[in-house]
Amino acid sequence: MSFPASALLRMRRAFCLSVILFLVAGCGHHEPRADLVIINNAEPGSLDPAMGTGYEELRIILGLWEGLMRVDPRTAQPIPGLAERYEVTPDGLVYTFHLRSNAVWSTGEPITARDVEYSWLRVLTKATGSEYVGQLFYIKNAEPWYNETMKDRSKLGIQIIDDRTLRVELNNPTAFFPSLCAFQTLAVVPRWIIEKHDDRWLRARPLPVSGAYQLEAWRVNDKVRLRKNPLYWDAANTHCEVIDLLPIGTPATAFNLYRSGDVDIIWDKELVPPELLATLRDTPDYHGFPYLATYFIRFNTTKKPFNDARVRRAFTMAIDRQRIVDKIVKSGEPVATHLVPPGTANYESPAGLPYDVPQARRLLAEAGFPEGKNFPPFEYFFDASAGGAAKIHAKIGVELQEMWQSALGVKAGLRQMEKKVFLKAQSALEYDISRSSWGGDYNDPNTFLDLFLSNNGNNRTGWTNAHYDTLMKEASLLTDLTRRAALLREAETILVREEAPIAPIYFNIGFNYYHPTNVQGLWGNILDVHPLNAIRRVVK
């Protein structure tokens, strides 16, 4: 491949610096190269399945911990994991899971139905603080159990039949429940280790894991090193002995390490220099694919003046999404006016708010801020693990700043934050407007629309709407897909047209960067989920 001379010069300079930083980060750890090395973006916040929320941690969690089901690397459909099979009653309400006889912890102890029960109850405990706890609310009485309004354990729809058999009763038929059982939050964790070490349980050595890989080392700002679990029930089909996942957030560093052969896979498009994307799209290393994910912004609806839907709608209608996609993203992403991506199963979204500057100005004037007069100071928050203004989030922030200034006469301050701090501020509602994105956990509109239920830990807007909650609850009771979709569309209309606690920007396109003759077992799928045990590096 060839690049402009100026780009090559920038890359060479960045490469020299990146090599120095990489060597310094690894000083004192002179170990052989891993079988597979992956750029994993930011430093993971937690490797606890109950606590993980970001891609950079969920990818690693997927390798360490397994649930009753796991994800097919080609199709992203749920397939048997720790459970070798399950039966479901004709009414779709009761699942009976049968655990494998060879399902054991990496330390040799058998994995039992009691371990599954403990892991799920741990998520359903308020003190745990799991933001994905809502994924268990489909189980009978799980939500009142979590809220401590129902304390009779016998009424909870999780029942141990014997060491190898678990019976789960749902509130309503939920076709995607097997997919939830494959998601990281419902993975099985070691009860006796957590009870002994409490919050420091991940530091226990040896650390018993239920998945294909053991945690050999987690060196902050250096790498997470995983080693094959020889006692994993499917160890024969786990291809790499050692995998390193590097927390690198600077595109020049990531790309130059790839070009030098020190890295085999780049998982995130934002870690390829944006000025090279147009050229790289024509190389065999570039792999794009349909993917259920949306880039959007959140408004903190608990803070004035963003507690006024007219202000939120005005800001949304002042965004020229096509300009952002064409000028900054440059990978053919479709613009988004609604939250649920096209191609989501059994659903078609309503249209959201269009780009309409005159109407945006009218709405802002109605809210008491004609031409932006007397509009209070506010900031747009975005995260960046490294790379500063070169990061795509920063560039989008600058573009939004200019659009709102030009269209509405308001001036946004820009605040870049380290990712962990950013997520904490977002969860605590300590922001005005913030950048966001969401990828589907399973192929159903619920994985997007459930986010903005009043009690969902991933809401992070402070927005509550009783009618929205009711529509979502009524939809969850239906097995008629047409009627269900109609209720979900009504709910999404409230979300993206009437109340606008969020402003969708574009739909993501899935991305992996690797050479197909060097890496195998990595397939683009609609959830962009790639089990580590399926991937292998071809040594020539």
Image (cartoon, rainbow, N blue to C red):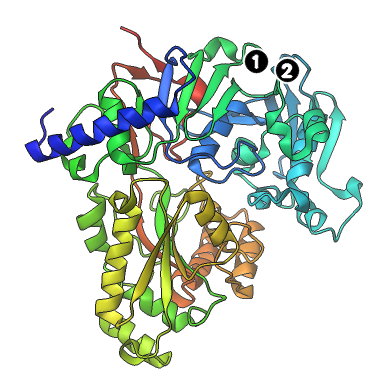
| Distance between the alpha carbons at the discs numbered 2 and 1 | 7 Å
- Where residue 415 appears, x then y in whole percent? 41, 63
**Residue 289 appears at what percent x and percent y?**
33, 38
Q: Dots 2 and 1: beta carbons under 8 Å?
A: yes
Q: Is residue 206 left or right of residue 228?
A: right
Marks 2 and 1, the one that precedes in the sequence = 2
Q: Position of residue 68 (x, y in %)?
A: 67, 30
Residue at the image position 44 percent from the left and 24 percent from the top: 26
Position of residue 534 relative to residue 255, above or below, is: above
Circle 2 packing at 10 Å, graded few (<14), some (14-19), many (20+), is: many
Q: Seen in the image, is 136 located left or right of residue 306? A: right
Nearest the viewer among 58 and 67 is 58
How many callouts does the rendering have? 2
Left or right: 164 with respect to 183? right
Q: In which quadrant will I find the N terminus?
A: top left
Regarding residue 286, the answer to whether it shows in the image is no
Please state which amino acid type lies under the numbered disc 1: Trp
Screen quadrant of the C terminus = top left
**Residue 18 image-quadrant placement:** top left
Residue type at mark 2?
Val
Label 1, on which residue? Answer: 233
Depicted 221 relative to depicted 259: above or below: below
Q: Residue at x 69, y 17 (%)?
A: 106
Q: Residues within 10 Å of mark 1 (few under 14, many from 20)?
A: many
Q: Residue at x 92, y 51 (%)?
A: 152
Q: Which residue is mark 2?
A: 104
Q: Spot the residue most to the left.
A: 5
Residue 19 in sight: yes
Image height of 219 relative to 179, above or below: above
Residue 47 in picture, x, y percent from top left: 61, 36
In the image: residue 139, left or right of residue 162: left
Q: Quadrant of residue 12?
A: top left
